[in-house]
Amino acid sequence: MSEKRGFVVSTPLNDAVESGNLELMKSLLQNGADPNAIDDEGTAPLNLICNQLELNDLHLSMMQQLLKFNADVNINKNLENNSPMIQLFNGKRKGKLRYEALKLLLENNADVMQVNRWGNTVLNIILYQKEYTNTVELIKLLMKHSVDVKTLHNTRYYPLTLAINFPSTEVAEFLLKNGADPNRINNCNDETLLFRICNKESLNYMDFKMVQLLIQYKADVNLQAPILALFRCKYFTDQTDVSLRKKILKLFLENNADALAACEYQGSIPRMILGRMKYNDTIEIIKLLWKYGLDVNTKHKHDFTLLHYAAHMGIGEEMSFFLQHEANPNTVDVNGNTPLNAMCDKYHIEGKDLQAFQYLLRYQVDVNIQNDKGNTPIISLFHRISEYQLRYEVLKLLLKKNANVAHLNNKGKTVLHVIIQTTEKRKDFFDDVDLGYRLNIEEIYRCMELIMQHGLDINVQDRNGFSLLNEAISYCNLDLVKFLFKHGSKVTTAQFQGGYFQCQNNVLPDLWMTQKIFAIIDILENEGFQIKNNHYLSVMKFLVGYYVPIKSLRLKDALKSGSTYVILNYIKSKDLSNPELDMIYNYLYLAKYRMVYMDQKTYHNLQSSVESLDSRDHTHDSVKIKENIEKYIKDAKKVIIVNKTSLLEILASSPDKMYLLLKNCDYQSVVNSQHFYQTFNGISSILQGHINKSLVRGFAKNVSLNPMRHLTKGLPHLCCEYIIEHLNDNELCCMYESLNL
């Protein structure tokens, strides 16, 4: 008779097992009960007994009774296909009497190679249980019944693979003594046992003992380079772990491991640990490797030596060690950089780097070696745009070693030309000056002055004949233009060539840059420089973005320039994202509600272009946008620029009227202020672009008048103005260029 046992439909014999009633079991068996009857989970009485968390003598007696009546010792009809023998050791079960139970099953012909649903044999299951103290005795018992400890089981693991994770070496040593191969791997993509241990995130003392044991039994210390796994991709924060890795490394090297081993991406062991481990530990490891044949001049990825790596990290003591052990300070990497050049070319220089420079320069370092770009260390030093105070200190060190300040790189530039090219271009003209830039520019001045003190002339020219003054003008660097004039630059060397004035330029100027170039022109004229038509053409092409390819722009750049010509072309040539569509709609709504001036033709062109692209489910809250713009309009009315003229009046004026208003007021102190950005957050760049458009247009019209009169052979002034009015900025550039003035 069967009954419900919890949610499982049980059997009488299983009930007897559950209740611990041996007499009932005997009676049922004597009266014909099937010893292999299973419940609805596929559990037979023998399965149920072996599956108990803790065995006692009564359970052994029940097993004997069932076996007396021919119970199947291999029955495995449960969900996981676990036989009684596997169930004895499956999961966290107390070890008491399990040896006796296993022996009983084996004596009754239990199949030691039978596997469960997951492919595990009883040996695998036993080796998964690390808590048993009699594991070796259990394995011996299985071996008496033909279990081969050298065989790969269905789980694709060798027994020894599981044994290395035990809290003692006893099981692994037993398997090794009985023929287990310490070098055998589970499959072609698997790791050796030594590699598995060394590759752990954290090592303990038993890992060290296991490595000792495997080496004792002839594990190959070079197979898969476990020596590299000791240090690859590790965080060396635990000193105990680091100490164990050093001990294992020493053990490997004493057993002929390759001290020169290196992996493709991380290189050799010194490369892996440089800058990631305490100095004393790093040096101890490197000394040990050096003792066993490490060559400090070996080249790694990109032809970097250890000295290159240490130099790049700014770790001076390690650099000193390498140099003391015959590292070549003038060896070059794949780009022709010496360690010194690599240090100078770093994006950021820190205080520790200064000490590293001092270490390196104590040795026979050539401070004038060129890399593949023709840059010497002194030029490389100023290819970056930060930490000029520290770069100044490095510069002094290089100059003391007779660095050549007059050298030209492959582009024909001196170090001063490079400084001008790479000087950080931040807002530096009007009221709210960026303090970081201001501090930097003072250090830049110091660097340039020091270089000039060491012999480089203020009027030096590059290979193309461009002076420092021309370089500063061509990169719109107002500060450096003033600096160069202060130190004696000749105004006649200005050419308005190169830099942003060349045809390869990808920079579309915004209001900030336009203001600077106008200020530079004013300074040049005050210095007596006569600006010629070709100079004006260069400036005009730059201001209108004549050479700038649309594909290189962002919409934000186009809006900041204010050029509706560029904005329209951008819309037509790009697949606009939703944020970009939002920006365009903001721009259109500003014009719609007359916060900014836009003629009807331009407005409709922009609107139709955007709407033709906006086929997606893009939505914008026109009510919310209107509310925001009404607030902006109120704020703009409150901002008085000059003579009771508000910012709103200026923005809403036609381009010609706006240009006249802007030329006769100090609008810069308002639109370049932090208050302006905060008040008009979200549209400040659009408003500045609108102002920029007016300034550029006014400039283009003014400088085009004489060329137009020349082209039309004396057409009246008003007629020329009328023609110019109907040409866009790019067309004016083409007209100007066609004259070949």
Image (cartoon, grey):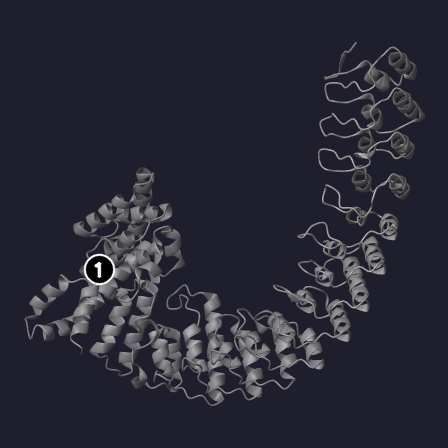
Along the line of sight, which residue is nearer the eye, 251 or 48?
Answer: 48
Along the line of sight, which residue is nearer the eye, 35 or 316?
Answer: 35
Does residue 646 appear in the picture of this structure? no
Along the line of sight, which residue is nearer the eye, 24 or 156?
Answer: 156
- Residue placed farthest to the bottom in the image? 455
Mark 1, secondary structure of its residue: helix
Does residue 557 appear in the picture of this structure? yes
| CA neighbours of label 1 inside 10 A, class few (<14), some (14 to 19), many (20+) | many
Q: Residue at x 53, y 80 (%)?
A: 377
Figure disc tally: 1
Callout 1 amino acid:
Met
Instruction: List x then y, in percent, for residue 269.
Output: 69, 66
Location of the N terminus by quadrant is top right
User: Which quadrant of the figure has residue 339?
Assistant: bottom right
Q: Residue at x 64, y 81 (%)?
A: 328
Q: Pointer 1: what residue?
A: 658
User: Is residue 278 placed above or below 741 in the rendered structure?
Assistant: above
Location of the C terminus by quadrant is bottom left
User: Which quadrant of the figure has residue 279?
Assistant: bottom right
Instruction: List x then y, in percent, for residue 412.
Output: 40, 82
Q: Is residue 709 left or right of residue 230?
A: left
Along the line of sight, which residue is nearer the eye, 306 or 189?
Answer: 189
Instruction: List x then y, in percent, for residue 419.
Output: 44, 77
User: Is residue 224 placed above or below 14 in the rendered structure?
Assistant: below
Instruction: List x then y, in percent, for residue 203.
Output: 77, 55
Q: Is residue 475 left or right of residue 148?
A: left
